Image (cartoon, rainbow, N blue to C red):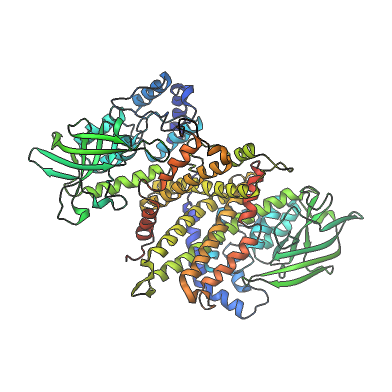
Amino acid sequence: MSDLEQFRAETRAWLAENCPEEMRDGDITAENQCWGGRQWEFQSDAQKRWFEAALAKGYTVPTWPKEYGGAGLSADEAKILTEERDRINARKPLSNFGISMLGPALLAFGTHEQKLMHLGAIARGEIRWCQGYSEPGAGSDLASLKTKCEDKGDHWLINGQKIWTSNADISDWIFCLVRTDFDAPKHKGITFILIDMASEGISVKPIILISGHSPFCETFFDDVKVPKAYGDDNLSIVGEVNRGWDVAKNLLVHERGMLGTMSPLRGATGPENLGGYAAGEIGVDATGRLDDPSLRQKIAQAEIDDWAYNLTVERLNDEANAGNGLGAKSSMLKYAASELTKKGSQLRMDIGGTDAATIGPDGIEYGSLANTWLYNRAYSILGGTTEVQLNIISKRVLELPSA
Amino acid sequence: MSLILTEEQEMLQDAANGFLTENAPVAAFREVRDSKNPDGFCRDLWKEMADMGWAGIIVDEEFGGSEFGYVGAGVLAEQMGRNLTASPFFSTSVLGATAVQRYGTAKQKEQHLGSICDGSTLFALAVDEGPRHRPEHIEFAATPHGNGYKLSGAKTFVADGHVADKLIIAARTSGEANDPSGITLFLVDADAEEIDRTHTPMIDSRNAANIKVDGLEVTGDDILGEVDKGYEALEGILSAGRAVLGAEMSGSSQQAFAITTDYLKEREQFGQKIGSFQGLQHRAAHLATEIEMTKSAVLKSLQLLDDDFESASATCSMAKAKSGMTAQLSTQEAIQMHGGIGVTDEYDVGLYFKRVHVAQQMFGDAGFHADRLAKRSGY
């Protein structure tokens, strides 16, 4: 038996023993996933047991080095773990922005001491992170951000406003892009800084979206003092002063990779077989087929696109593992995934007709079809709009000339 | 299994790219077209391809093939799609070889596979009976006659039918016109007296034939596969064809797009490169994304044919749909982004547009395959 076969056998056995039955529903939504953090309360005993078992094995962050709380798995091993987890339809034991976004950036840019402090706390589910990037005046043109960060000797002084900070109201720390030089070209005066949300002067206000709900907030910084360092060789900034854009860019690639999840047409909550669902809702004709030929064709075309998208995630991952980096092609995945996400919930709304457009006396119910459909409009806007992704593909993949 | 080419397959790709750009570029295709070559391809080129092992690319080594499987066939077809190479490769080495190797008797394999591999015998598949692909709609009659059958009927759009030495004909031995059961495949000599072939040049400058058969007597030895169960074999042959056509269209999409992005980087209007205009950039970026999606779909279908041929039908169907949509978009955009010169005969993009249209029609366009997927999935 090869080492990888051995690993697969061990992983299968470990999952069989440690993943509770209730955690094998594969049903990861923002609602039921394990986020972690200071305010976290487990939703069930099974969720707690699954988290603790994974933590002990380093499987909350399987590919991170052992010294930072991971299991140090190779790309091949991590793929096997994912496959085996998917095979029994197991949830991820812990998922949050610390794992998917900040972690990879710290691994690339952080010092050993920074990694020990922050990665360890992420791996153990102790700290929940949010992202402070966009500002009211800096959306697609992110690099024009104006949140001011002044050097006050032993600390930084921060004033300004962030927007679209997901879950800022329940997060513990924020990784933030701030302006440390107002005179330099816009990309050259930005610094990447890590801030405790409990700091004095930070206030948070939730934003209500067309869907009636939202994880998003506005975050205000009013004379917020941030220590220069959290310990020896452990600055509050990541990378160098005024070079935060390099870190931000790296992190955006991970964010897009994360957004490029599987089966976007279905989403976390959609039916496995959209056409079968439509036939159930709408009815069938005399030959037993969905009694709406135009929807039938639209659904099938979308299913084919979704299938090809999933294969492309797989293929680009395989190419990356074989040494050809994903690079700006992650923008293709982000673009395709967000368009498919919108298409999926649009089709479900079309299938539901006026029933789906009806809301209850208390407004749009959280988790309802309409709620998802409305929220999903944001997918092609957040994390870099569809148009920004197309710009990136034009410039970095196709190398088309600039205006 | 990884969704990438193995080292061996990559070497085949490099070799095919080198050989075709050198010996069969678009200019060579134009020459065949403009000289009104009655074959529609260059026989010397075909001989060279056979000598390199391409004609027997999917055939097992024991029969003289190079046993590269369907991924190998797709790798070649992709490069042919890039260069618009016209050859009997598809009809003979994909359709003919699949039919004989997977469904033939030991005797039929012995008799035909060797001459497929050395390029000496050309095959063609006669399935459709009207202008739109409907493989279960078969009226072409095989009526019992003595110990065998008598074949009578008409077939349309038999690709390479005008040059084929052997024809594989889907005929009805029982049941009604749209009944998938009751179909039987026959493997017959194309030059039989009872077969009348009308050469039909196509818009892509490839060639096909309409075929009329009037009372051709055949025996049990001429049956390919099982009586009345030919639809399953036909489905297998068509699946292989669809995946390989997908690979060809993927190659054509990529090349038409490469020609177009080069042009966007060089053509100037309003004092700047037209590739700097966001109106064109976004369309190009969308197309680039679709091309990536198509590559994955095609490779998956080819791998599945090699891994588990019997289960590949739905996947090949989806790959054909995806590649067809992308190829259509790629070649339409190629013409539009070239502007006036895009609709001239002198520029190559129009040739890709024409080829892709015929490849879309062949064995079902994207709408056909989307409908098949729906039907298979219970809607």
Residue A83 appears in the figure: yes
Classify residue A193 by image quadrant.
top left
Residue A235 appears in the figure: no
Residue A2 lies left or right of residue B164; in this view the side is left
Q: Quadrant of the C terminus of chain A?
A: bottom left
Specify the farthest residue to the left: A153
Query: Taking A245 as reference, is B52 above or below it?
Result: below
Specify the farthest residue to the right: B146
Residue B250 lies left or right of residue A392; in this view the side is right
Residue B64 lies left or right of residue A238; in this view the side is right
- All told, the count of numbered labels is 0
Specify the farthest residue to the front: A361
Residue visible at 47% across and 59% down? B287
x then y, percent, for residue A110 = 22, 40
Classify residue B38 by image quadrant.
bottom right
Residue B267 lies left or right of residue B344; in this view the side is left
Residue visible at 38% across and 28% down? A34
x then y, percent, for residue A329 = 39, 52
x then y, percent, for residue A45 = 41, 18
Specify the farthest residue to the bottom: B35
Residue visible at 30% across and 27% down? A37
Query: Taking A277 as reference, is B329 above or below it?
Result: below
x then y, percent, for residue B122 = 69, 65
Of the pair B128 and A383, the residue shown nearer to us = A383
